Amino acid sequence: MSASSVRVDLDGNPIKPLTICMIGAGGFIGSHLCEKLMSETQHTVLAVDVYNDKIKHLLEPDSLPWAGRIQFHRLNIKNDSRLEGLIKCSDLTVNLAAICTPADYNTRPLDTIYSNFIDALPVVKYCSENNKRLIHFSTCEVYGKTIGSFLPQDSPLRQDPAYYILKEDTSPCIFGSIEKQRWSYACAKQLIERLIYAEGAENGLEFTIVRPFNWIGPRMDFIPGIDGPSEGVPRVLACFSNNLLRREPLKLVDGGESQRTFVYIKDAIEAVHLMIENPARANGHIFNVGNPNNEVTVRQLAEMMTEVYAKVSGEDSIETPTIDVSSKEFYGEGYDDSDKRIPDMTIINKQLGWDPKTSLWDLLESTLTYQHRTYAEAVRQSIAKPLAN
Ligand code: NAD
Ligand code: UDP
């Protein structure tokens, strides 16, 4: 970017370079947000995480055009006194840190609740006490189940959008019973949202809350046994990628009937970029960020990923591409599911003029091309190894 090309916000005001404390910067969303901020802006990022593998390409070598504008701070926000100093010397804090894989919600409910509520408390407190702006990542899962899911199967009201579209300012949050520990995550996220909202109302905290609806793309989670634990269960994109790479059937939990809308990470990052640079339009708001046009059942997602992977890898798909598995077998006791997640886009469209662009087919094509290029050889070697021994 040339020094003469001054960037302006949505209201035509010049954008001043910011210092951003990004907590959880080493994760999937953080790595894409860091990439965007380094390549397209003059902002400085203090990247906080316990890992940095996904942002290593941005940190080294020193000859990178943005060297000096990104610093990595390896720290655990649970117990590190350096956190307040980093928040104090920043203009804005973006908090992404969380345990956010469904396989953990019912098997590690305490870690899930601590990570999503207790560990976020000091971040909110330091922002509020030091008059610093906060963009906090919540989740679409705070909506839980749709009202429509409680209607009889044959009720015509199930087709009425009023019974399933999820709106920030009017939809209720509907979770299962306490023994369905799946909802430990959603409940912890809901409580931290309420706390941030209350800090805004009572103490003037400038905040924005983001509710991501299944953002997917390169660098999401891990491939079990390659860059994560062999027995680990990542989110669905990585589970299905792993099955495709290993030429195993894709596992459909409880028939794969749940519905999701998937948004391409690069589209979603555009929305966060707009929030960062337009505080007057973003402060005090909760934003759904998703793509209502990309709705599929999990079964349809499996079928599309199988077709796209055959195209990008040049390999025929296997004879039995999917198998059914019960949620108890796959996730264990206490799993439950969101039936359907279609975001209402009115608020983000009105405040920030943002709309998602990428179709499901296109985003799967670029993501699975990345998965194949990054992992196919490593998976081939890991499968060959036990035979060689
Ligand atoms: P991610 O797991 O890839 O990233 C989270 C990062 O936070 C990780 O790098 C992790 O090491 C770090 N972290 C966790 N606890 C920490 C701690 N105590 N100290 C320091 N670092 C810590 O997840 P993501 O997909 O990038 O999600 C980011 C945020 O967005 C989360 O809050 C998540 O709940 C929310 N979210 C994401 C999606 C999605 O579609 N990806 C959907 C809903 C909500
Ligand atoms: N799922 C599945 N097979 C898998 C992994 C996930 O059928 O191998 C289902 C899961 O039960 C859920 C959906 O895919 O209905 C999306 O799961 P994900 O882990 O991405 O998280 P969620 O959208 O539930 O937060």
Image (cartoon, rainbow, N blue to C red):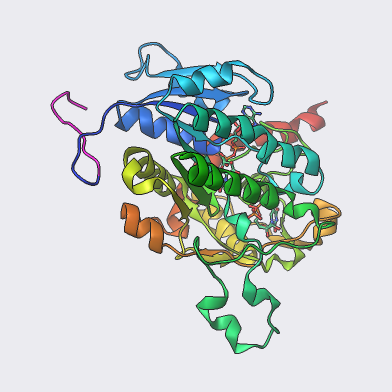
For the view shown, which residue lies furthest in the top direction? 62
Relative to residue 137, is residue 317 drawn left or right? right
Q: Quadrant of ligand 1?
A: top right
170 relative to 265, above or below? below
Residue 156 position in % (x across, y down)? 59, 88
Report which quarter residue 381 is drawn in: top right
Residue 167 position in % (x across, y down)? 50, 64
Residue pictured at 40% horizontal, 27% vertical: 91
Residue pictured at 59% horizontal, 49% vertical: 194
For the view shown, which residue lies furthest in the left direction? 4
Chief SS of the magenta region: loop
Q: Is 8 colored magenta in this rendering?
A: yes
Q: Is 158 colored magenta in this rendering?
A: no
Relative to residue 289, is residue 4 drawn left or right? left
Whether residue 368 can be seen here: no
- Pick whichever, 103 or 129, lies toward us: 129
Residue 231 position in % (x across, y down)? 79, 39
Residue pictured at 21% horizontal, 38% vertical: 8
Residue 149 position in % (x across, y down)? 67, 74
Q: Quadrant of the C terminus?
A: top right
96 relative to 146, above or below? above
- Pick whichever, 266 or 379, lies toward us: 266
Whether residue 30 can be seen here: yes
Report which quarter residue 176 is drawn in: bottom right
- Pick whichever, 175 or 359, lies toward us: 175
Q: Quadrant of the N terminus?
A: top left
Residue segment shown in magenta: 1-9
